[in-house]
Image: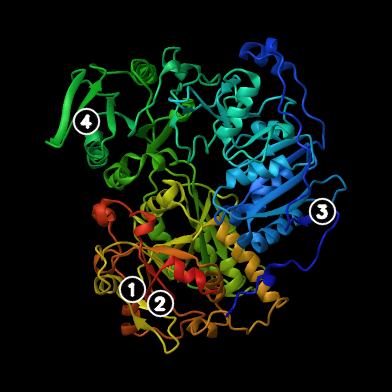
Amino acid sequence: MTYRRSIWTPRCFIPFLFAFYILLSTPEQIPTPDLITTDPANSNWPNLALQLEETPSIERGSLTAILPVTRTSVLSLRDTLSPFLGPATCVSKVLVVCPESLLAQSRAAIHQAVHSVFESDNHPEVSLYPWAGDNPSAVVLKAASLAPTKWVLLLDETGLNGLSNRTGEMLLCPTAARVPIGPRGVIGSPNNRSCAPPSPKALPAAYLLPPFALPSSTVHESYESWSDLGRAISQSLGDELGGVIRSFGDPDSNWCKDVHVQPHNFPIFANQQDAPELSMPSTAASLMTNHHPGFFIFLLPNVDVLDLAQRLICLLHEAGHEIKILLYSDARPAAAIWGKSSRCRLHYETAGQKVEERHVYPMIRDWLEQLEYGPDVILTLHEMIMQTLWIENVTLVRIPREDLMHAHWMGSLSLSEWRNWNIPRIEISVITQDRPQSLERLLSSLARGRFFGDPVALRMNMEQSSDLETIRIVGAYKWNHGNLFIHRRVVHGGLIPAVVESWYPSSNDSYGLLLEDDVELSPLFYAWIKMGILRYRYGEAKDRTGHLFGISLYQQKNIELHPEGRKAFNPRSLFTNSRLPHPSTPYLSQIPCSWGAVYFPEHWREFHDYLATRLSESMMEIDRIVVPNVRSNNWTKSWKKYFIELVYLRGYVMLYPNYEGFMSLSTNHLEVGSHVKDRPKEKQDMFRLPLMELRESWRLLEVPGGALPPWETLPVVNLTGFMSSLEIISSLK
């Protein structure tokens, strides 16, 4: 079936919110003034820095924001646009620059964005600017050269995401400077470029990286890159200044992301007034880091705890990372060698004497002060109150003591994944009605789960018809890993709204684990989820993609979508017969899992929009066949039917485990319910899988190469269990 893009067109249009343009031809040329002129007396940096402090903001309505869209970022375009649509900015126009193939999707996202803001006569115009080619930077610069306003704000596809509130406010009403100004930039000589760190003071830059603001008259359509723009500005000024970096020193989660220059040496510790006891001394504030691979510090109490972390530490050491270990409560000699393998013999340091608890933190501070350069990651016990230590540009990971011996899977993470450890937030949503014994089994398995120090919110969703025992179990349940929310319907909704409305993402770093009460979990389910999210959402740029909509805990043992009925499925046999080099690899499947799976925020929001449109029948009849020749077309009460449609239309895939013997991170007990009328033993055996036990945590890394594979090497399986590819499934819609 041909995908009808009109399905996404909203049914109403609000002209008061924005003026919408499609620029299908080259916009009218605007005369380009000469590049900024310079008073030689003011071209040096100290004078310019002083002037910046006294320069007012630009006038309201004098700023055009240029926002490029990519295949991945279009999924979150609605949220990315939000900051520019409010009244308290200087933005009068937003130009969304997108490939022609994404015009319909971008148009729908813009409609959704403006529907979410209040009506006002004082609103920016939102325009679409289609483009072809493979250099979005050049297209943004070309679009900026045509801007009708005096100032332009140049963005990348992330918009203002990752920036602090005050940095975002600065960009939405920037200083009326005659040079580019923004929070990200590249410094150094032409032969030694590096990304500048967040700094409380303004810094001179060779050139800036988006987002940054500048006079529109300084941009020529001939520029192909940000460095071209910086070079032209520098030449016009007669010095090496291509822009000004201004970030207030605030953290920036997208700092130096996907930029082919080295991070600059930067101080990693800064004082925090509410924690003077643990504020780092001035010498520590000058610690530098400019190394690869990573530098890891382990702050542990004694050798016994160190032994628990042995496999994790040794994996990091064997991967080439630098390791330093401080045992802060051990009275052994001040330095010793530890390790039970010739491949993993490491030095550790102690205080050399028994340290009273009140002296532990000052001792740690003194030890850190003596380091030659700062670490990338500090790992310590969850019981350590290290959050009071403000550690700038260093990832602090706090692991419960009892989880350390099961944390060796963390040794497979890349440095980029470690640095993003604290960003994703996984939220668990339990859906239940009237199966109290099943619910107790699920909740018991949740209680046995290991969460490796992460805060995890739990939401319990009860149907209006839930029985008294179910209500009692939910009310008595204690959750020790984060917030607990209890929700009960007052009107019976049925299975589709019970699942679909059970969770909604609060941000693009929010992930939903959906669990119906006939599911049981492995104690290691969270490790598999976190490992997958970090690799394919926060890892190397080549491994991040908008095609991936979630991660399954359950191994597929059957394929249910064949028109003629259910068929057995063994991915290892399929991959062996297909002559893949690694039949044990995890793989990608188009089939959404309902027996324990995490769903990604952008895709779940899109599913909500799709389902609302689909059920309203405003664009097509409810019985219209969207996906040809699949059994799910007969599932009238299943939310999966409609998610399969979305997957088919978009070319999306889910990550599945592929451990030996169908060992899984979740299993299904095939309880009687909406879709199951009886449960003979042979039928139960078709769906029940062995769960990975806690003592088998080492098996998490029983994957090719001992780590989750690169994205491009993952096999792709279609809706009926046959080998395919992303190119093929993306072309079928």
| Alpha-carbon span between mark 4 and mark 1 | 41 Å
**Badge 1 element:** loop
User: Picture quarter containing residue 48?
Assistant: top right
Q: Which residue is mark 2?
A: 670
Q: Quadrant of the N terminus?
A: bottom right
Whether residue 315 is visible here, answered yes or no, is yes
Q: Position of residue 397 (x, y in %)?
A: 40, 36
Q: Quadrant of the C terminus?
A: bottom right
Q: Earlier in the sequence, mark 3 or mark 4?
A: 3
- Please identify, in this view, whether the residue under mark 3 or under mark 4 is nearer the observer: 3
What residue is rendered at 56% in x and 61% in y?
Answer: 603
Pick the front one: 568 or 590? 590
Q: Which residue is mark 4?
A: 303
- Whether tag 4 and tag 1 are in contact, CB under 8 A, the answer is no
- Please identify, in this view, whether the residue under mark 1 or under mark 3 is nearer the observer: 3
**Badge 3 element:** loop
